[in-house]
Image: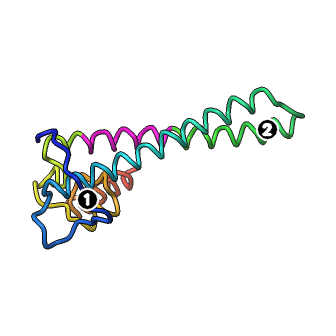
Amino acid sequence: MSSTQVKLPKGYKPTQKEEYMSAKQLEYFRHKLLSWRDELVEESRETISNLQEEVRDVGDEAERATRETENSLELRTRDRYRKLIKKIDQALMRVDEGEYGYCEETGEEIGLARLEARPIATLCLDAQERWELRQKQMGDGR
């Protein structure tokens, strides 16, 4: 993919009438992914800042226990953000490589509606359902 930026018209949304994963659509999803990534990075920074402030300001035992529970939740959230950011980075690489929007398993189009709802999707709906079924079957064998 060339690195020349495509200028998107104000309020642009991909439509079925356009060529699937055209330069405009790829740029639209690149922008959507980058914006999401920026939000997650900022929220992670705020989480770290909150945790650092709370360490300095410790009260009685009950308050400390409550804070530790809150901190644990914050850290789990931060870990979830870190994993999401990694998936967003992988999606951005697929955009750059011209592979974005196509199922990693079948090569079929993932579809605009699915990508709009979940821009980091790597599987078409059929492949996703098969994957989930396999996961469920493996989980039932305990």
> Is residue 138 left or right of 77 when viewed as pictured?
left
x%, y% of residue 6?
19, 50
Alpha-carbon distance for marks 1 and 2? 41 Å
Residue tagged 2: 65
| Extreme-top residue of the structure | 56
Residue drawn where x is 16% and y is 42% of the image: 4
Residue type at mark 1? Gln
Instruction: Please state which of residues 110 and 27 is positioned toward the viewer in this rendering.
Output: 27
Disc 1 or 2, which lies upstream in sequence? 2
Residue drawn where x is 35% and y is 57% of the image: 136
Q: How is the image coloured?
A: rainbow
Q: Which mark is residue 13?
A: none
Residue type at mark 2? Ala
Q: Quadrant of residue 133?
A: bottom left
> Is residue 78 left or right of 95 when viewed as pictured?
right
Residue drawn where x is 11% and y is 40% of the image: 2
Q: Give the magenta range.
A: 79-92
Q: Quadrant of residue 67?
A: top right
Majority secondary structure in the magenta region: helix
Residue tagged 1: 128
Q: Total number of numbered labels?
A: 2
Q: Quadrant of the N terminus?
A: top left
Q: Is residue 105 rendered magenta in the image?
A: no
x%, y% of residue 91?
27, 45
Q: Secondary structure at mark 1?
A: helix
Instruction: Please state which of residues 39 and 83 is positioned toward the viewer in this rendering.
Output: 39
Instruction: Please state which of residues 105 and 30 is positioned toward the viewer in this rendering.
Output: 30
Residue 53 in the image: above or below residue 114? above
> Is residue 110 left or right of 63 when viewed as pictured?
left
